Image (spheres, helix red, strand yellow):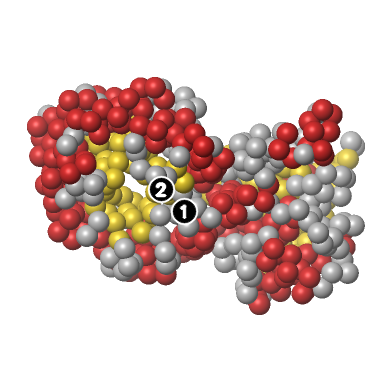
Amino acid sequence: MTRTIKIFDTTLRDGEQCPGASLNPEEKLEIARQLAKLNVDVIEAGFAIASQGDFNAIKAIAQTVKGPQICSLARAKKEDIERAWEAVKYCERPRIHTFIATSPIHMEKKLRMTPEQVLKQAVEMVKYARSLCPDVEFSPEDAGRSDPEFLYKVVGAVIDAGAQTVNIPDTVGYTSPWEFGQLIENIIKNVPQIKKNSTVISVHVHNDLGLAVANSLAAIKAGADQIECTINGIGERAGNASLEEVVMNLKTRKDFFDCETRINTKEIYKTSRLVSNLTGMMVQPNKAVVGANAFAHEAGIHQHGVLRARETYEIMHPNDIGLTESKIVMGKHSGRHALQKKFKDMGYDLDKDALEKAYQRFLEVADKKKEVSERDLEIIVAEEVYVVPEEYCVEKIAIKSGTHDRPTAKVQLSHKGKKIKAVATGAGPVDAVYKAIAELTKVKASLVDYSIQAITGGTDALGEVTVRIKDKDKIYVGHGADTDILVASGKAYLAAINRLIYAGIERSRGTTARQ
């Protein structure tokens, strides 16, 4: 009988912990809605006690997103568990995910607790969580480096205390697939409560040695029934197991794994792009499943084979992950109806206001390009629809630069209905633009990262710029696109500044609300 593997998505919790991937509550909600369309089983929406913003985002997701279970992480502490319950209690199927470390190094160096104290704390807090929430998951943090006998004891005890799911994390990505698969097999064999209570065994694997997906698949072969993963594999340090890679392994090699998921794979590509756009974490071109080159063929023998029969070199069909093959050529003569249909074919169901914004931006791009590609349209949606409220907007950018000219930028922004202007010089044209924007916005954040990517081929391609700016200890991501790379650079920098300003407003609201 084919097993169904649960997909527990932690993009909004562990994924957001990736340096520079901070999301505001509206962006988290947008991603959660898309994860529901993807049909994940569980959304770990955040760590409720971490901040007021995280709490608000989890609560909003619990109140509005239908379908998946909504979960909050909580340390094995009463205050964490109570805060998690306050955030998730509004949804139809809430879950609290509590954890405590069980490896010798974590217990001694971090917790400063004995194994007996850790066991007692785990049991008491699972019982307390269960008294509030009907569904409780427990994780022995750093299980991959824990003593197996102690691990068996903890797993059995928390199941007796009421945990319906026990997650086995390889928190630091230390184990190999052979070790990790054996660990899962041994836990199932040595903890009788698992079969007796039909407990779901889950795994959460980090990618420090590049083995997160391989370890997750090894765990499935060993009997695990839930995989914790993130879109594009983002997360702490080197990231987590990539959802799209795990899911497409199970789908493509069903003959080997004899497992399936409930994931609507046609939403994978769209979800990947949304997460990439909102977090500013670019997907590497050779990334499995969703990278730009995943279905590209350059070698002549490969091209010949694919033209004869796709399956010669493509083990997955692009349609499987929601990549459509364009049948409608979009250009400046295309109307709203054609654009709306194209967006719908691509999986974007835009309301009237969002469509109008996207259409106006489409006309600007179409005036500069002969044909507008699907990748261009994705950037238009990202730039015009999934944005924070704009405190400042770009009106005009003019650059004077050359081999014998000092780069000079004239920038005009709109702010609260007024047009404001500044002129600045810099080491280069981008530097000049950024100095003018900083002067107009009075924001003195430092630029920590700047990257450019051509979206489509040709000299008329849209250029996509992603920047990260730092203010105190916080990183803010900005994203901009234009056929003029200097304009795209200005848009990206201003988008990051708008996120910084918006975050400050949200923090002020949170402080006021607590008072």
Q: In the rendered view, tell whether residue 510 sits above or below residue 222.
A: below
What amino acid does circle 2 point to? Thr
**As drawn, 413 above or below 454:** below
Residue at screen point 37% across, 65% down: 62
- Mark 2 or 1 closer to N-term? 2
Give the side of residue 290 with respect to residue 106, left or right.
right
Q: Mark 1: which secondary structure?
A: loop
Which residue appears at 76% of the width and 53% of the height? 325
Name the side, left or right, on which 182 lies relative to 383.
left
Tell me the tag on residue 262.
1
Residue 102 visible in the current orientation:
yes
Judge whether 233 appears above or below 39 on screen.
above
Q: Position of residue 289 (x, y in %)?
A: 61, 41
Residue 495: x and y in percent read 62, 56
The part of the image, by quadrant, that contains residue 3 is top left
- On screen, residue 271 versus residue 184, left or right, reads right
Q: Circle 1: is it few (<14), some (14-19), or many (20+) Cα within 10 Å?
A: some
Q: What residue is pinned by disc 2? A: 4
The amino acid marked with disc number 1 is Arg
Residue in front for this viewpoint, 415 or 299? 299
